[in-house]
Image (cartoon, helix red, strand yellow):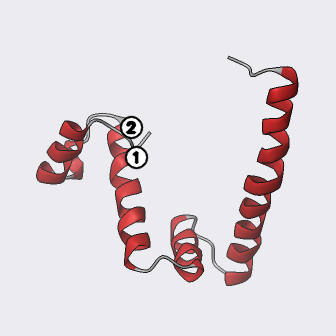
Amino acid sequence: MPFIPPQQRLRIDMEGKSRCQSVGDLCYVEYKKLMEDWKKEPRWTTAHNITKEFANFESDIDVARFLAYMVWFNIHVMNYEKEKIKENGDIL
């Protein structure tokens, strides 16, 4: 979970990644880097390149297939699941 309290973010930003005390702290560091790259150039090519590096894909075709799957899953599968939650209730 990258959304750690602001005081933890500041401590990590000032003291460095080696000062991370939890997996949430580590996730914050990684998420912050993704957001910095994204804000520099928010476009599909940036998402493609981040994914290629992040997931150690070797070919652009593999990245494109994976990202197409993620878009499909996010739009279609998750909308279906949201409808099923409305219909059948959530699992808590």
- Quadrant that contains the N terminus: top left
Q: Position of residue 26 (x, y in %)?
A: 35, 45
Kind of residue at disc 1: Cys
Q: Compared to 20, does 14 lie above or below?
A: below
Q: Position of residue 17 (x, y in %)?
A: 24, 51
Q: Position of residue 73 (x, y in %)?
A: 78, 55
| Number of numbered tags placed on the structure image | 2
Q: Which residue is mark 2?
A: 23
Which quadrant would residue 63 be assigned to in this image?
Answer: bottom right
Q: Position of residue 56 (x, y in %)?
A: 57, 69
Question: Is 15 on the left or on the right of 63, as rendered?
Answer: left
Q: Residue at x 25, y 41 (%)?
A: 20
Q: Residue at x 35, y 48 (%)?
A: 28
Spatial separation of the CA atoms under disc 1 and disc 2: 6 Å
Work out which residue is located at the far top of the displayed protein and give it: 92
- Quadrant that contains the C terminus: top right
Q: Compared to 77, does 36 lie above or below?
A: below
Question: Is 70 on the left or on the right of 23, as rendered?
Answer: right
Q: Which residue is mark 1?
A: 27
Q: Look at the numbered disc 1 and give the secondary structure of its residue.
A: helix
**Mark number for residue 52?**
none
The reply to whether dot 1 and dot 2 touch (C-beta < 8 Å) is: yes
Which quadrant would residue 8 be assigned to in this image?
Answer: top left
Q: Residue at x 32, y 41 (%)?
A: 25
Kind of residue at disc 2: Val
